[in-house]
Image (spheres, grey):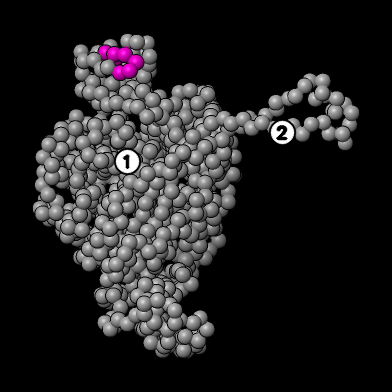
Amino acid sequence: MSFVEYSDFIQDGDVAIVYLSHDSMMPVKVQQGAQTQTRYGVIRHSTDLIGQRYGSKVTCSKGGWVHVLHPTPELWTVSLPHRTQILYTTDIATITMMLELKPGSVVCESGTGSGSLSHAILRTIAPTGHLHTVEFHQQRAEKVAEEFQEHRVDHLVTVRNQDVCKDGFGVTGVADAVFLDIPSPWEAVKHAKAAMKRRGGRVCSFSPCIEQVQRTCETLAEEGFQEISTMEVLLRVHDVRTVSLPLPDFGPDPSEPDTEREAPTTSGPTHAAVTLKTTTPPREIPGHTGYLTFATKPRT
Amino acid sequence: MADHEDDDYQCRIKEGDYVVLKRGDIFKAMQIQPRKKVIFEKQWFFLDNAVGHLYGATFEIVSGGTLQPEKPKDTVSSDGSKEAGTDNRNIVDDGKSQKLTRDDIETLKEQGLKGQQIIDQLIKNSSTFRDKTEYAQDKYIKKKKKKYENTVTILKPSCRILALMYHGREPGKICHMRYDTLAQMLTLANIHAGSKVLVFETCAGLVLGSVMERMGGYGSVIQMYPGGGPVRAGVESFGFPAHFHDMLHEFPICHVNSLLAGTLDTTAKDTNTDETKSNMAAEEEQNQPEADEQGSMEQQNMEINTGDETGQDQEKTRKEAKAQEKKARLEEKRKKLAAAAALLEGRNADGLVIASRFHPCPVLMGLLKFLSPSRPFVVYSQYKEPLIECYTKLREHGGTVNLRLTDTWLRHYQVNSPYMSCSSQESTVLTPSLKRKSLTSFLY
């Protein structure tokens, strides 16, 4: 198992995703002899996990069952331990495409936070790219480095514990893309530019407030970035359900032939209905996560 | 640090390169061919002069359709004295504000005035420009720029640019898939280097090309195609290096059932060549329109190349060569089919991406069998109803978890120009909320 390479069977030392339901998943470090508690009972790693196929149904001690899935950055995003606010897959997908990430890309990121986006970046740039990620919070930087190791992607990433606004990314002239998720991105635009390749590249800044976006766009324009564009992407999940629509009864229709007029009276009032599959829109409008500002650094 | 690599010849435009032309928000994919007349945004020109320049360069189209590298200039309009009104209370729309007539502008053009110079003239001759607000002035300039500027930027193609291009120019060809939807699909299907991915698409090859880009030449992509031959013009536009095509395989869906039943014959032993051959021939026939086109193009090229030489014995050798070629092509095709079948037989694909005008339900149920356990798949349809059917069927069928029917909303924000640091966003554009759904799930 690795976050950048699939394998078929669960092995000692893997991180597997235990799928309880669509809104409840938990990452499990697989260890010989270890146990994991779930609401359906205990999972014994040695017998229930190790040697099993990813995707298997595992019966827990209380008789309930769960699925054990191969980890992906997307499953990690919905199951990782939060140490900060995180980026979700909808934004991550947009960022990945709009930053033009692909195998071999060199990317700079700050802040690392809980590593939700970092894992998705690593998946996309492997096996020949590199991620330079900067996090000013020491414990968070250490923790995420540990996770990269457990997820077997540490060879693709350098974690730096420093303040990107003051000290930059620690590299110059190497990045194809830069991502900023910090409170004052405009202070890091210069550093982003310095970190990027001479031939240019793409930059993205994520900010929840429009005032931040405004200042960032100003600075980007001042620094000569082009194609500056700000967007927001929201996910709508459609709930598929069966609905039953009753048909109205207007009573006997005298203009219709006799036989049909007789029918309802003999069988009494009918409760005819049509059943169909449809979707209901999400009950709440999906929450605003943040604005994504993209720009292109031209060749300098 | 990596500067020497920066200036490598990858960054320079070469003859034969696939490029994207850009002006404003308009894109067009092209191949650089010598003396080829290109029409873009109602203007014609030749790309010859772009060869040797760096990607990202902007060119001016001068008389005779020649490209001239644009001189570096500050993009901010030159006249420093800014005068602007506060609102539009004194502006009357009487059609008389512009003193230059259409003919005047044409004369200016004939005199060889460039885009920016014409715009300057328009501003000078507009009686209301000075009374417009700064915002309105900006908008005016932007609009006129779009109309009179004759520059073109040459870009290296990418999934982002081609998705934007197709969506802007020919949405019908890509089942009206928006670029943000494509982005979701590539991520939710966990497309990455080193995996084995099945793609079923009728999106001109845009989806297939995007998957290939994300795999960077590592692993294998199998295009499951309907009909006589795979359609993938869009893949060409990506301009991938040659080795990327080594990972691309194709398999006709009309052979899926026989493959699953284990009756598909891909050997070329003497005993059953006939049968295989007739199969191939049938396919070839279906393929005819495409093949014909290719053939005639080849012929044209040949004619240009051989030019003045003509002879009867040449006709004969040509015929022989053609027969030989056809044989070789059939053999090549058989080998390809065998290779794709070998990849599929293990039923251990790592990803499945479906985006087509076909009913997604049978496509999904047919191809799902080739997927390994615990691997994601994603299905796109322009319409919601068939995806509801897919969803219901999968639920009844069992075997999938984390199934979701989703679509995305995309909204662009116009953020004000730097020198107008007053308020928040001025206006918003909501992309039409046509139903564009993608169904994603994980299979166990």
Q: Is residue A230 above or below residue A5?
A: below
Q: Which residues are magenta?
A: A38-44
Callout 1: SS: loop
Chain ID for label 2? A
Kind of residue at disc 2: Pro
Q: Quadrant of the C terminus of chain A?
A: bottom left
Q: Which mark is residue A248?
A: 2
Residue B4 visible, this angle = no
Q: Residue furthest right?
A: A258
Chain ID for label 1? A
Query: Which mark sits nearer the N-terminus, 1 or 2?
Result: 1
User: Residue A41, percent across and down?
Assistant: 31, 13
The residue under the point 20% across, 43% down is A112
User: Residue B141, percent across and down?
Assistant: 38, 76
Question: Is residue B94 inside the magenta stretch?
Answer: no
The residue under the point 21% across, 15% down is A34
Closer-to-camera residue (A29/B229)? A29
Q: Which mark is residue A88?
A: 1
